[in-house]
Image: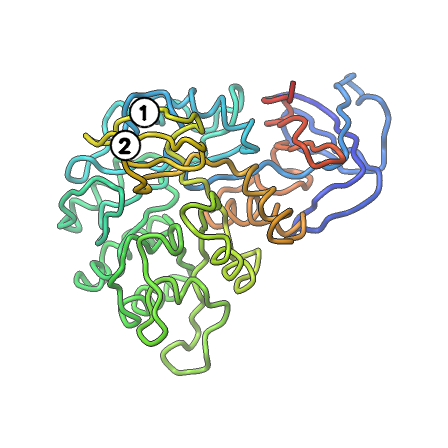
Amino acid sequence: MANCRVACKRVVLPGGRLVDGECCVEVTDGTITSISKDLESGGPDGSPLHKADLVVPGFVDIHNHGIGGSNDILENWANPDYTLSRLPSWGITSCLASVVFSKPHLVSDKVISSLTHSFGDTRHGAVLEGIHAEGPVINDWGALPQISTDISLSNFENLLSSLPNLKIMTISPHLESKRHYERLEALLRRNVVPALGHDKVASETEILGALRLAQSHGKRLHVTHCFNVSTFHHRNPGLVNFGLTSEFPRFEKYENLKPPTIELVGDLSHVHPLTLTTAVRARQASDIAFVTDAVQEPLPGQKVMYNGRRLEVSSDATRVVLSGTDTLAGSCSSLLQTFYFLVNNLGVSIGSAVQMLAETPARIAGIAGIGELSVGKRGDLLCFDADLRLMSTIVAGRVAYACS
């Protein structure tokens, strides 16, 4: 952790509030200690002064499979330094490691060991805050490896104990309803956020059962990459219908229930811009987290294996596809690109865009101390020039990326 001061003309404060007027953000020992009009050239210890037009909190990516470092995507997080050192150039200062299960109910020991030694390290790039487990109790696989989902409660509890710092787990309400939601309840008891997803057949009744259980625990559910591997229907509601709902109608079956929060992949390939517009207009910024769902860097033609399947980055570096086809298999888009899309193409305010990229995802995942510019939070800052170009990324007061 380090000390720094950043003088700027605009700053985004909690709640997506964009404030104009010269100010200085001071970070001491990695923590924000003041946001004031004091524009002196340095702090009492002579900490360096950086200058920017706009300062916002670092972006938080709660769904990221690692962007390289291995010949197989399943092993990307066995080499966390590769991804974490590169994410600051994407505007990302914190992330969750998204892991999947290539064998029944298992993540490789090498991945788990590497993650365990990397949590909370602020010295080498973005900070790894925990794990988002995508499965194994999911009904529709999409691009994920297909494994058995018939896992007993006792084995499920053992699995949860084997996943260090687990923050979110994607789980299918259709499968859970058959088990009386016992595994969902296990997540709630452990304060792991259940994210409903990978379920094209979940009925309204099955989804409502999950929401009621969460409500009885005083918790709120989430939806993994809304629109992807899920359905919308005008008469038979699916997960997407619930994801687009900001307030339930006044019928007894919805009484006292809160709609789930949602995450959206903003690479413009997983979800069409028209559909993203609909979602952003339908929900509040405090209910939406944009994620990368990244599996590779945007290197055109780059090839990688994924559990025996060969993938490659598309020629325009916008997505990852099954080699030799146009079948979508993953993302290689940054949250910085999503920020520009939201502001420049959807007309979303800078404050609301930042809220959906930093504050909301941190709150959804239950990660304290990040996602906002306020005293006491970690000094994770993005510094932009007057043309909204990223100048530098600061993690815990230390420059982790500087535009050349």
Please tell me which residue is depicted at 36% across the width and 48% down the height of the picture.
192
Say left or right for 243 vs 28: left
| Image quarter hosting the N terminus | top right
Q: Amino acid at mark 1?
A: Lys
Please tell me which residue is depicted at 39% across the width and 29% down the height of the picture.
296
Asked if the residue at tag 1 contacts the one at tag 2, i.e. Cβ–Cβ closer than 8 Å, the answer is yes
Question: Nearest the camera: 174 or 152?
Answer: 174
| Image quarter hosting the C terminus | top right
Q: Badge 1 local density, few (<14 within 10 Å), some, or many (20+)?
A: some
User: Percent x, y for residue 183?
Assistant: 24, 54
Q: Helix, strand, or loop for circle 1?
A: strand
Question: Nearest the camera: 51 or 143?
Answer: 143
Spatial CA distance of label 2 from label 1 is 8 Å
Q: Helix, strand, or loop for circle 2?
A: loop
Q: Please give the residue where the numbered disc 1 appears in the rendered image.
A: 303
User: Percent x, y for residue 9?
Assistant: 81, 38
Above or below, 324 against 141 in this view is above
Q: Residue 323, labelled with which disc?
A: 2
For discs 2 and 1, the disc positioned in front in the rendered view = 2
Q: Amino acid at mark 2?
A: Ser
Which badge, 2 or 1, comes first in the chain's sequence? Answer: 1
User: Percent x, y for residue 31?
Assistant: 64, 31
Residue at the far bottom: name it. 251
Question: Nearest the camera: 219 or 324?
Answer: 324
User: Percent x, y for residue 360?
Assistant: 54, 50
